[in-house]
Amino acid sequence: ILNVEQSPQSLHVQEGDSTNFTCSFPSSNFYALHWYRWETAKSPEALFVMTLNGDEKKKGRISATLNTKEGYSYLYIKGSQPEDSATYLCASPNSGGYQKVTFGTGTKLQVIP
Amino acid sequence: DTEVTQTPKHLVMGMTNKKSLKCEQHMGHRAMYWYKQKAKKPPELMFVYSYEKLSINESVPSRFSPECPNSSLLNLHLHALQPEDSALYLCASSSGTGNQPQHFGDGTRLSIL
């Protein structure tokens, strides 16, 4: 069973501040790492899928890095805006077959105007 | 707008009722999923269908009965549920490989009286 952990559980930042949070996962038998953003009353939305060690992906002000050898990924948000307020989930597939995905508990971000 | 449609959005039912949750996707995805999500917890996998066949059942009680009538539809039949089954039920679909993200519906908020 995969154990995917995220920290911190929750975070409050001022508008304009940059922030980051962590996802850790077992480094053995790694296949891929997913990041999702889940806004209240909406469905989780995929941000990134990362597969290669050293991968870095960017989408607007949000970026993510991946270290498969040590089993962690960072998500960065530059110049946080109120619309970035959401729960950010990371998830790791157990295999490449049926994509049985284990989710972390999420980091709940609140951006204060 | 989400590409995975779930109905109903909200459902209140008694412990003796029979009801069904419905999920539909038209992205040609071969894998479809049911998740259960309780407050402050990550989504918890219940069932996975691949090519319309049940491939994973995460030891879910038989009062939950999944059905995949065709490649676009996924149902979850509910009977004799317990109050602890009250949760958000999320449907998702994907290409079925771990290097592609899952696409989620908005969920059905289920309350058992």
Image: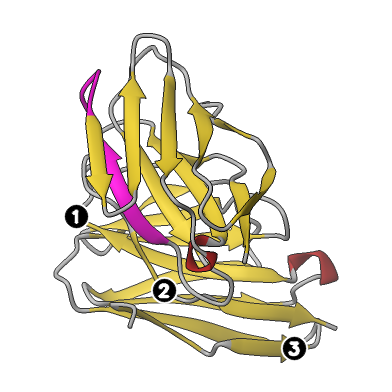
Q: In this rendering, would B29 be left or right of A69?
A: left
Which of the 4 image quarters holds residue A105?
top right
Pick the front one: A22 or A69: A22
Crowd tier of the residue under label 3, counting other residues whose Cα lies within 10 Å: few below 14, some 14–19, many 20 or above: some
Residue topped by disc 3? B13
Say which residue appears at 52% left-offset and 75% top-offset. Answer: B107
Closer to the chain start, of discs 2 and 1, is 1
Residue A26 appears in the picture as rendered: yes
Q: Is residue A29 above or below residue A101?
A: above
Q: In this rendering, would B2 be left or right of A111?
A: left
Pick the front one: A26 or B59: A26
Residue A97 appears in the picture as rendered: no
Q: In this rendering, would A32 be left or right of B59?
A: left
Say which residue appears at 33% left-offset and 29% top-offset. Answer: A65
Residue A51 covered by magenta stretch? yes
Q: Do the dots labelled 2 and 1 sit on one chain?
A: yes
* Residue B19 tag number: none
Which chain letter matches label 3?
B
- The secondary element bearing badge 2 is classed as loop
Rounded to the nearest angstrom, the CA distance separating label 2 from label 3 is: 21 Å
Q: Is residue A9 above or below residue A60?
A: above
Q: Identify residue type, mark 3.
A: Met
* Residue B95 tag number: 1
- The secondary element bearing badge 1 is classed as loop
